[in-house]
Image: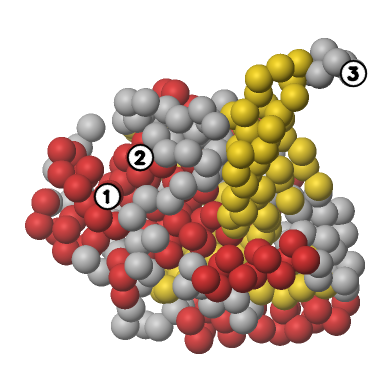
Amino acid sequence: MRFRDTSREDLYAALDKLPQARFVVYGDYLLDHWIETEVTRLSPEAPVPVARVVDEHWTPGGAGHVAMSLLALGAGVACCGFRGSDDEGLLLSQLLSDGGANTNFLGYSPEMTTTTKTRIMLTSGQHLLRVDDDNEGRPDAEVLDIMHRNVAETVWKWCHEDLPRAVVVSDYNKGSMIETMVPELIAAARERGVPVVGDPKPANVGMFYGCDAICPNEHEYHDILNRDCLIRAAITTLGSRGMELTDFAREPAACACTFPATATHVRDVCGAGDTVTAFVAAGLAVGLSLHDAALMANVAAGLAVEKPRCSTVALAEITAELHQYV
């Protein structure tokens, strides 16, 4: 597995541009709650383990994890989408701001709650249980109108012509995929020559027309193919088998390239798909080809799953790891 379209010198020159890059990340912003426990006995009340809390963490999830992955590369990120007007939403915004993100474009609505995923796990990293508190609302009309009027302007203001830039649309089907807004955002990006990378749920893939690439998992990819929709390229995660790039613009049709998994010790696969989406966008932003952006994303995902929880990969880490692939 080697970079096909990028020399060593060009690759490192491209990576050096990432701290100057700008990204708009639109989508479903979630909150991840991690509870680390120790289990030493079974409950006398029912045949279940008694877990004693040792530590807990809160991290941005969904589109928030994509944003944090790009921030870890030193890039500038504007978060665009919706959160709930609850304590969890305030914490989510604070975590993103503390990480360096611009949250001025992240709307909140009283009609929505902030989707929170609570994972109860052992200190060894083994997951015991996940409890989801999902948002089932949609933004109220006033908030939606403000966001709809500003979504294209977000791209114009944030993605400067003289800087590497890209737009990411991250869909977790939690209320932010608005039928008119997503196509308008993609159209605004394409008008400005900004690459767009999407991670759609199959039911919403029709909104993603115009994306340079989408990043589904294997199950989602086959569902998307059955929907007879127009997509340019798909970078599909295959779990322990790595990733596959399917470029529908190449001849023969659906020309595919497989990238074997690179992780040597998998610790936690949570957020690996978000890592792939972020690094594909990062690669396209600095001028890498689809093939080489996918290769970099595959290596980055391998680094991420060797860490606990939803972890990010720093620019220094990916730069050092890519040495063996060029």
Point 58% across, 66% down: residue? 95
Judge whether 264 appears above or below 213 on screen: above
Point 35% across, 30% down: residue? 263
Q: Is residue 113 visible?
A: yes
Density class for disc 2 (Cα within 10 Å; few <14, some 14-19, many ≥20) is many
Say which mark, if any, is on residue 303.
Answer: 2
Place of residue 8 in the rendered image (x, y in percent of width and height, measured from the top left):
11, 51
**Nearer to us in this view, 187 or 50:** 50
Q: How is the image coloured?
A: secondary structure
Decide which of tag 1 and tag 2 comes sooner along the chain. Answer: 2
Is there a contact, CB below 8 Å, between mark 1 and mark 2? Answer: yes
Decide which of tag 3 and tag 1 comes sooner along the chain. Answer: 3
Judge whether 320 appears above or below 141 on screen: above
Point 68% across, 55% down: residue? 30
- Secondary structure state at the residue bearing disc 3: loop
Q: Quadrant of residue 120?
A: top right
Say which mark, if any, is on residue 317.
Answer: 1
Nearer the viewer's eye, disc 2 or disc 3?
3
- What amino acid does circle 3 point to? Glu
Place of residue 246 in the rendered image (x, y in percent of width and height, measured from the top left):
43, 38
* Residue under pointer 3: 45
Q: Quadrant of residue 264?
A: top left
Point 76% across, 16% down: residue? 42
- Secondary structure state at the residue bearing disc 2: helix
- What amino acid does circle 1 point to? Glu
